[in-house]
Amino acid sequence: MSPTAEDPVLAVQDLRVTLPSRQGRLAVVDGVSLELRAGEILGLVGESGCGKSMTGAALLGIAPGPSGQVSSTAMRLGDLDLAQLDERGWRRIRGSRISMVFQEPQTALDPVFSVGNQLQEVIRRHRQFNRRQARTAAADMLASVGFADCARVMRCYPHELSGGIRQRILIAMAMVCHPQVLVADEPTTALDVTTQAQILHLLRDLARRSGTAVLLITHDLAIVEAICDRAMVMYCGRISEEGPTRALMQYPRHPYTAGLLAAMPRLSPGQVEPVKGIPGSVPAPGQRPPGCSFSKRCERADDLCRSQVPVLHGADPAMPAAVHRHACHHPLVHPIGSVTA
Amino acid sequence: MPGFEPTHRVWQKLRANRAGLAGFALVSLYGLIALSVALGWAGQEWSLVSGERWESASSEHWFGTNQLGQDIFQRAIYSVRIAFEIGLLVALTSTLLGSVCGAISGWCADTWADDGVVFITGVLDSIPFYLFAAAVAFAFQASAWAMQIAMVATFWTTTSRLVRAEVMRLKNRDFVQSALAIGLPPHLVLLRHVLPNTGHILLAQAAMVFVAAIKTEVILSFLGLGVQDGVSWGLMLAESTQEVLVSQFNNHLAAAIPLLLLLLGFNLMIDALQDALDPRQGSA
Amino acid sequence: MAFLLRKLAHGLLLILGVTLVSFLLMVYFGPDQTYNLLGKNATAAQIQEIHQQLGYDRAFTSRYIDYLHDLFTLQLGASNSNGEKVIDLLWRSLPITLALMLPGFIIGNLLGAGLGMLAAWHRNRRLDRLISGVSATGMSISFLIIVIVLQVLLCTPQGLNLFPARGWQVTDLPSYLYYVTVPTLSLVFITLGYNTRFFRAVFVEELGREHIRTVRAFGASPAQIMGRHVLKNSLPAVLTRVLFSIPLVIVTGSLVLETFFGIPGIGKVSFDATTNGDQPVLQAVVALTAVLFVVMQTLADLAYRLADPRVA
Ligand SMILES: Nc1ncnc2c1ncn2[C@@H]1O[C@H](COP(=O)(O)OP(=O)(O)O)[C@@H](O)[C@H]1O
Ligand code: SF4
Ligand SMILES: [Mg+2]
């Protein structure tokens, strides 16, 4: 049975994260909808500053700072209505049904507690385990993220371990209560290439084995290509294109996606192409142009783009349920027959 | 200037901070009072016995009179000048001393000069202040400057330590290294490029020393180690400890309230200053 | 081990420094004690003799070494004013000072930590502004004023008149409470602003660290975050400050409180010694508290090492 056929474990509609500013409340995440199915890895990709981390944290009910606000029109985790949760309710599911891994393994662990202590803290918060059971569960989890000598690792303090090992431990902490959803926010950005690959494989393994749905946040399309089933491209707090990884990468429709792809360093034999970056940079939340927020950096921009916000839709408006969708007035067109995904 | 926040940004932040502005206004008002006393326009009759003992407030004696029949208002006003004299003297001297020693120590980090300064600050910080003041008062018996000497001797160490850390940080910055690389003499680099960039630390620290000096004067004068003859808020409070026991509160209030307002003004101003100058904020 | 030795050497050096300062101020450049001890009509022979006794005729280093020797063998001489041996005087007054200052010191720190925690958790929100504003005000009130106001309110017929304005006749618990309450309240009020501000700053810093975001993402409650992660991480800073402030509070606090409430502790002893020019007493207090301070500083360094697994 293919996992995509099932009902989504996480379904979010019109997610919004707002921050106060002098110009009033600014939407840093501006109407993102997403669905995650069991065992699936969904990539959320975009340049830094476009709101990916905010989106990820909002899925755990964490608003940026005391004055940030998260809202949505619907938010369900399995049979649980997240929109109804108060802070206490959120705390009960954070770390148990929906979990998160962060970018900086160097600083994400508390330096003054041993690894075992921190791992068991998570277990005993969410499960009615005694000390022994918690220890066993912690050791089991460490084993399943690839540690041989679990007892020794549990005695270690974070500063005694390398970045890759710490990230493994953080993943173990995130997975130890077998959550339905794991949000991994740039989990490999701070690691070297070899370790990066190991961590990505571990994530894929865990997703397949335990059925946990993973939202993988990254700025790197190569990572999306390597392990994501589907991908969403984010720009200025909105989704500009989404679809199955293959289709999206081979036949990008949104000029932003195309730009990201062109900026991707590729090793193609014989041909050395200079890497093209997208001109300009992500505007700060208060300085986004009206209409399409990409219009300042887009070669195809015209008056329509500068006045009307493009909405996410399929290539063929007659097919509303299209899996490959984009938010662009003048999308890239690919030769007929080439789009098979 | 490299390494320093653009001045207009600092101003914008300062201007946006209402509490800080109120503090600044309050301190300025006191400064004006102190100035007019110093110029002889007000508060000159602080020692004149102009009435009976413990007269209550009247149009003649706004805050009444004290035990000796002196006008409390005049004394309170004159004390503003004393407080500013002490505060300014101690703040300027200890800032000067602290910045010179701190700069030398930071610039020559890990040499004997640095070790010496660090050792001296460590020693001075190890002697509890009021005991140190007592010792100085004892050594310089009956000198009118014992209090100021004790304050400067202990207050400069914090400034020195802060300046040292900042100079050490700045020394490794590109603009300093390149100035050295093109062959500018080190003392010029220190004077022109490094020290000006410690300005924000010196400003905030001088203000804090000013506050500390005023508060300390009160305690020392109360203990008999401060202002020897004359008047100050500390002496007024010392006088008033006897008076309040017989329900004479004028002297106490006339010293306590101005003192409280001045210190509050300073604290608000310092907080605003530090917020505005803190390089870690505002870049988010 | 190397660390321990380095710290000890550093501490010893500091002790040499502080004793040197106290020697210079109180003995070497201090006022001539001859006539204090002999009276106005001393004979030349008497003067010669006392100069020899006091060492006025000897070289600087030998006098300093003698001074150190006397200090560390606790041969502190006798008080000029009543002839009591200084060591006895200190031994008698120290417990009183400790009994007087300890409750206020502890309560002040606990309250400050609690308020600092609240303010840090609600950073930049209304509760924080309130707490920070009140502590700024508290720091602006001279502690003399706090003491006077509390005394008028609680100890005089103008106020509630519940407690004694002066004195220390402590024999049992009720009498202890009777005499210690107002000084304790004073000390708490005096230190609360500073304590709250310190703890708030430390906790804000700790709350901003990334591992706090992690434990939050794993479902920790505010109490768990504060009580477990923030507290343990801020332990070195807190310990350092608490240890450092012990000598300061004991000496500075007791100087004012004991003078004001007429309590015969270390502070009153040093105050009387200052006003009477009682050199043996004053120099003993100065040197010993400075040494105590250095010891505390060294202990704080060691505590720092113990509390932090990274440097163990
Ligand atoms: N605490 C904050 N206050 C105000 N704006 C913030 C804060 N944190 C992040 N931002 C802004 O929110 C936007 C989205 O940030 P983020 O989600 O971290 O982006 P990404 O993870 O895609 O790099 C950025 O433009 C950033 O400037
Ligand atoms: S809507 Fe217009 S500006 Fe925006 S991406 Fe499409 S073509 Fe470019
Ligand atoms: Mg991010």
Image (cartoon, coloured by chain):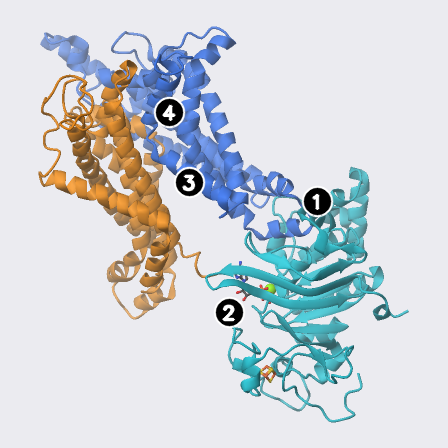
Separation of marks 2 and 3 at Cα, in angstroms: 33 Å
Instruction: Name the residue that disc number 1 marks.
Output: A155
Chain B, colour shown: orange
Of marks 1 and 4, the one in the foreground: 4
Q: Which residue is mark 2?
A: A284
Q: Amino acid at mark 2?
A: Ala
For discs 4 and 3, the disc positioned in front in the rendered view: 3
Residue B192 on image: x %, y %: 25, 61
Instruction: Tell me the subunit letter for badge 2.
Output: A
Q: Colour of chain A?
A: cyan
Give a yes or no on whether discs 4 and 3 share a subunit. yes
Q: Are marks 2 and 3 in contact (CB under 8 Å)?
A: no
Quadrant of the displayed image that contains ligand 2 = bottom right
| Chain letter for the part of the structure drawn in blue | C
Q: Which residue is mark 3?
A: C133
Q: Amino acid type of disc 3? A: Gly
The image quadrant that residue A310 belongs to is bottom right
Q: Quadrant of the N terminus of chain C?
A: top right
- Residue A238: x, y in percent? 62, 71
Residue type at numbered disc 1? Arg
